[in-house]
Amino acid sequence: MNIKAIIFDVDGTMADTEDAHRLSFNKAFAENKLDWNWDVALYDKLLKVTGGKERIKYFVADFLKGYDKPDNFDEFVKHLHAVKTTHYTAMMRAGGVPLRPGIRQLINDARKAGVVLAIATTTSPENVGALLEVGLGKDWGSYFASVGCGDIVPLKKPAPDIYNWVLNEIKLPASDCIALEDSNNGLRSSLAAGIKTYITTNHYTRSQDFSGAAAVFEDLSNLPAFYQSAGLRL
């Protein structure tokens, strides 16, 4: 297999951001005088749904039985998510979450070898930019041929829409690409798009089902082992 492109998920894959998201949600709830608190155990359950706004709606529907939703509930959710994003991006710009082991080196090695890089994530463009500006530098956007994120497609992971969008952008078939993911939802999304997928786990996803993955790693601290497994000549 001649790999021409690597497509990265972001949250949990490029950086362990999930707890930063969780804490930012809680700050948004507190600012809006809500007594909602997402602890680690609850957030683990909420992560079955991708997308921040979707996650809030899932929480209200499944964990707040009897909650009297305001008439403008959709707008209220958008507001909560916007406040959360403000807190999250501030945390990222303060350098609160580093890139995971091996990610920066993988990106540098791939660029030197002429491998196309792309991003396929359900998080917002603001969140991606805040993380990668610190992790890779202000010119991080020039590293990637395509950055697919947020609400750019109608259906989020595990639907394949975001990967299909990225494949169309980079003008390569799925067979020429590999994906890096960290979750079952992400794996299902990339596999449904026909992309060979490698997993790096984190404390939220370690026990998930990764059937169909090409290989599962704890992280990419041993890049030679990953390169050998993926058939990358970097």
Image: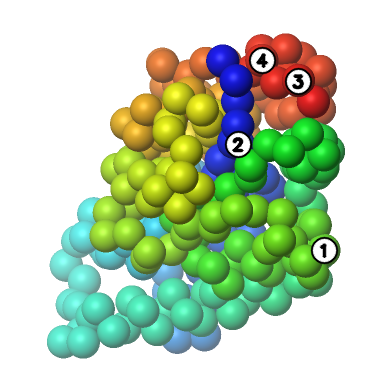
Is tag 3's residue or tag 2's residue first in the polypeptide sequence? Answer: 2
The one of 84 and 127 positioned closer to us in this rendering: 127
Q: Which residue is mark 1?
A: 137
Q: Which residue is mark 2?
A: 6
Q: Residue at x 69, y 47 (%)?
A: 15
In the image, residue 68 lies at what x, y percent?
18, 77
- Cβ atoms at labels 4 and 2 below 8 Å apart: no
Instruction: Indicate the amino acid at tag 2.
Output: Ile
Judging depth in this view, the residue of 135 and 177 nearest the camera is: 177
Q: What element does badge 2 sit on? A: strand
Q: Earlier in the sequence, mark 1 or mark 4?
A: 1
Mark 4 and mark 2 lie on one chain; the one further toward the N terminus is 2
Decide if residue 133 is on the left or right side of residue 210: right
Q: Position of residue 111 (x, y in %)?
A: 77, 42
Q: Which mark is residue 233?
A: 3
Q: Is residue 99 left or right of residue 199?
A: right
Give the spatial CA distance, label 4 vs label 3: 6 Å
- Do the residues under discs 4 and 3 have CB atoms within 8 angstroms? yes
Q: Which residue is mark 4?
A: 231
Q: Disc 4 on helix, strand or loop?
A: loop
Tell me the kind of residue under disc 3.
Arg
Q: Identify the residue at horizontal 59%, vertical 36% (top origin).
A: 5
Asked if 85 appears above or below 6 in the picture, the reply is below
Pointer 2 local density, CA inside 10 Å: few below 14, some 14–19, many at least 20: many
Mark 4 belongs to which amino acid? Gly
